[in-house]
Image: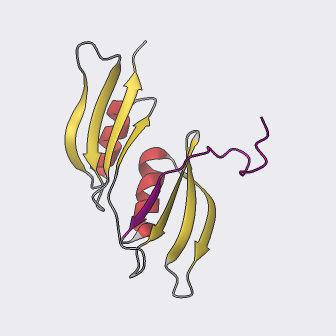
Amino acid sequence: MDASFKPKGYNSLSPYLIVDNAPKLVDLLKKIFNAKELRKFENPDGTIMHIELKLDDSVIMLSDSSAKYPANKTMLHFYVSDAFKTFQLAIDNGCKAIEEPVNKEGDPDTRGAFMDFAGNFWAVGTQKS
């Protein structure tokens, strides 16, 4: 399949978050998920117009909110190698616990959930073998 229509290493669909204080969320995602910054464009006033972060094999995009683009909130599910460790990193970095990681009967995944300072709901899961 010809993938020349998108940057190498990018997925075809990327969540796009518009938040108040995008630099704070970028720092948080770097601490919790070891996010790597790919591309960044700033507005003349120094706010983030657009930034792309690589989280494992996925790309997430974000920007600072503005009058034209108000902040939004979303729910994201992210598979990680250790849901317990990732959940604890989030809590240690100021996120609010929603549900501690647990493996529910009949579910092959251990899942936990937390909310970041911007009101985004993050579910983290690790599939058990």
Residue at the far bottom in the pictured view = 45
The span picked out in magenta is: 1-19
Relative horizontal placement of residue 45, taking residue 105 as reference (left or right): right
In percent of width and height, residue 41 lies at: 61, 73
- Depth check, front residue: 15 or 115: 15
Quarter of the image with the N terminus is top right
Which residue shows up at 52% across the image and 82% down it? 46
Q: Is residue 126 above or below residue 128?
A: below
Q: Is residue 121 above or below residue 88?
A: below
In percent of width and height, residue 71 lies at: 35, 69
Relative horizontal placement of residue 47, taking residue 119 as reference (left or right): right
In percent of width and height, residue 39 lies at: 64, 63
- Depth check, front residue: 47 or 31: 47
Our reading of the magenta stretch's main secondary structure is loop
Tell me which colouring the rendered structure shows. Answer: secondary structure
Picture mark count: 0
Q: Quadrant of residue 43?
A: bottom right
In percent of width and height, residue 76 lies at: 38, 45
Which residue shows up at 65% across the image and 46% down it? 10
Relative horizontal placement of residue 28, taking residue 88 as reference (left or right): right
Q: Is residue 77 magenta?
A: no
Q: Is residue 8 magenta?
A: yes
Which residue shows up at 36% across the image and 73% down it? 70
Which residue shows up at 32% across the image and 58% down it? 73
- Depth check, front residue: 7 or 81: 7
Quarter of the image with the C terminus is top left
Q: Is residue 114 above or below residue 84?
A: below
Q: Quadrant of residue 9?
A: top right
